[in-house]
Image (cartoon, rainbow, N blue to C red):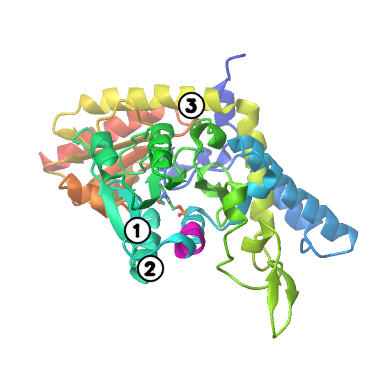
Amino acid sequence: IPKVDFDRIRKDFTVLDQQVNGHPLVYLDNAASSQMPVSVADRLDAYHRNEHANVHRGIHTLSQKATDAFEMTRRKVQQFIGASSSDEIVFTTGTTDSLNLAANSYGMENLQKGDEIILSEMEHHANIVPWQMVAQKTGAVIRVIPVLDNGELDMQAYKELLGPRTKIVSVIHVSNALGTVNPVKEITALAHEHHAVVVIDGAQSVPHQPVDVQDIDCDFFTFSSHKMCGPTGFGILYGKKHLLDKMPPYRGGGDMIDKVSFEETTYNVVPFRFEAGTPPIAAGIGLGAAIDYLNEIGMEQIANREYELVDYAVSRLREIEGLQMIGESSNRASVCSFVFDDIHASDLGTILDKRGIAVRTGHHCAQPILRRFNVPATTRASVSFYNTTEDIDRLVDGIHYAKSFFE
Ligand SMILES: Cc1ncc(COP(=O)(O)O)c(CN[C@@H]2CONC2=O)c1O
């Protein structure tokens, strides 16, 4: 496989060419949202300028062309995550929407009082709150897999939590707060031994490594376009066809119906049953362009590049006196989270921004895991394949500069 020239790749991200506060931008907030290559921005521009029309029911040419381009993304997503059919690809507005759909449609239909939903201590709020809402309505109970001191799941505790009342296991693939990559294939196999259904929150895995949902054998898988070089406002719920077929829609309106009368309404087939109203057409086409871009580089190459960068970041950060990494797992993707005893994360983030360095500080919509590590906030640097070791060096220099303020 020819080695990818990532220096040339970086030039595709013109947003990185700017100055921030008089310094060249160093963008290390990719876990929050990735940047968009020129080819995706151009695709969106071309659609808006020359191709826009509403999709699915138009009989005129422009509508058909927009429909073809939009539905092409469904097939691209199917191929990208290794689904067996494009019918298993539901378009949503993002991972949060996808998880709410899984919880409100599959959850509400299949949970009885006393049934158990297993989550983990490191979940993002998008994979906690929808299940709490459904548990309140159904009387189901939420059980939580603890996280070890190194930021990995306590798999022994997980095995002990599994039992005859376990109906759903919903866990994060890669922690957006710690960077830990969880053994989702093993988690799924263990859950299936107890006839539980498995939902994987893949928001932080799909952008950074090859994902094969049939190999994992999970029942549902969710992710967002804006974390994988695509536009915001668009995401995916993958679901095994035999499960989606039995799920009721949880949002009603146009397109998701077959026949409507005031006496009775019948629904469209899967996946359209779950896609009410005019979809974010441009964003869907933009995601298709993002997948083309990622496929051209190759997810293996992207994963290897990012492992190199995150390993370099961890080794350089570890040299800094007083820095405490939160989440020490060697099996990590993209994210480094850290704290200092004597510098609050938001102060550090503000000073880094003054030097053109973009990181995220706070609880990263994962308050339980920060509480577990007894920290109010962390500073999180998250890399993507278009970052460089110079970006990491600038981050480390920026931290030393910030420390000088507090010494
Ligand atoms: C693991 C995980 N799950 C769900 C979500 C929600 O995705 P949407 O916002 O696209 O619905 C995020 C977003 N990550 C947050 C967003 O900002 N910083 C983060 O780490 C996430 O990292």
Q: Is residue 212 above or below residue 266?
A: above
Residue 353 visible, this orientation: yes
Number of numbered discs on residues: 3
Residue indicated by mark 1:
115
Q: Amino acid at mark 3?
A: Ala
Relative to 47, 347 lies left or right: left
**Residue 257 position by quadrant:** bottom right
Q: Are marks 1 and 3 in contact (CB under 8 Å)?
A: no
Say whether disc 2 or disc 3 marks the residue closer to the N-terminus.
2
Residue indicated by mark 2:
138
* Nearest to the observer: residue 143 or residue 281: 143
Q: Amino acid at mark 2?
A: Thr
Find numbered disc 1 in the image and state the secondary structure of the residue it sits on.
loop
Magenta residue span: 102-108
Say whether disc 1 or disc 2 marks the residue closer to the N-terminus.
1
- Assess whether residue 105 is covered by the magenta stretch: yes
Q: Residues within 10 Å of mark 3 (few under 14, many from 20)?
A: many
Q: Are marks 1 and 2 in contact (CB under 8 Å)?
A: yes
Disc 3 residue: CB within 8 Å of ligand 1: no
Residue indicated by mark 3:
303
